[in-house]
Amino acid sequence: MSRVTTPFGYESTAAEVIAGVDLTGRRAVVTGGASGIGVETVRALAKAGAEVTLTARDQVVGERVAAGIMDDTGNSHVYVAPLELADRASVRAFAASWTGPLHILVNNAGVMAEPLNRTPEGWEHQFATNHLGHFGLALGLYDALAAAGDARIVSVSSSAHQMSDVVFDDVHFENRPYDEWAAYGQSKTANILFAVEAAKRWASAGITANALMPGGIRTALQRHVDAGTVAQWEDQYRWKTPEQGAATSVLLAASPLVQGVSGRYFEDSNEAELAVEGNPMAGVAPYALDPESATRLWELSEQLV
């Protein structure tokens, strides 16, 4: 397969990659749509005419964000729904409440490098939120996605996937020392492997699935990261604005340039090349695209959720 490239790049914004695209009549869900790049993803899709439901843990904050986006875009079809990805009941309730087709699912919400935290099931919280919650959500919405005929699933991963493969023998850190970055990296690898397997399993239903690295963006996602680490990042890397950070998500969700593309990992609005040793901020690790690991993760995830 040839690498997918577009005219866009590092500095492109969500508005630029979706310019000229008409999403009237299409319906989208963006998890974590009330903060960070989620807000700009919702804004871009709504401005292009889509009906967008943003999920939020805080309904009041979500309603305030939605109101601002409706005022900004003139699109009155921006809705808010509660969703706690680490809570299986919440995920099931959201999926059960959905009626009609769903054309775009952006798995955007996430947590980063938090101290050890476990769900009532004993699951490590980053894996439970970033991967298992979105996996359960996609499964619950499968019929709606299939009904669309050409649905797209977009999973926000990270270059931090290079910090860890999925450790199948101890996914939840029950028998190994907990490391917040290894846990985050594992969950982000899982986001990519989900796209690889969904692309294979759901192709016959017209569903495509891709994952992406949005870039480094200063948002609430870094709330668990110590100030010294953030300061070091600022010395080493260029930060994107939230509008730039949302660009690759929006491209994969709506652009005709990637129509039919599936099972791939993008960064800076282009398909990523394989990672090169010594440059942990770019590229995709081969293990994150491994089809056998993707199948194994899917089967494990089905058992859990």
Image (spheres, helix red, strand yellow):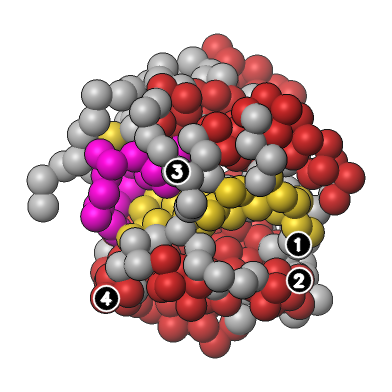
Residue 243 seen in this snapshot: yes
| Residue wearing tag 2 | 90
Query: Label 3 to label 4, Cα distance in Å?
Result: 23 Å
Camera-near label (3 vs 2) is 3
Q: Is residue 207 visible?
A: no
Q: How many marks?
A: 4
Tell me if label 3 and label 4 are in contact, CB under 8 Å: no
State which tag comes first along the sequence, 1 or 2. Answer: 1
Please, what is the three-letter code of the amino acid marked with disc 3?
A: Leu
As helix, strand or loop, the secondary structure at mark 1 comes to loop
Name the residue type under label 4.
Ser
Instruction: Say which of 177 and 145 sits in front.
Output: 145
Q: Give the quarter of the image for residue 279.
A: top left
At horizontal 48% and vertical 45% (from top left) the residue drawn is 24
Of badges 2 and 4, nearer the viewer stands: 4
Discs 1/3, front: 3
Query: What stretch of residues is rendered in magenta?
Result: 250-266
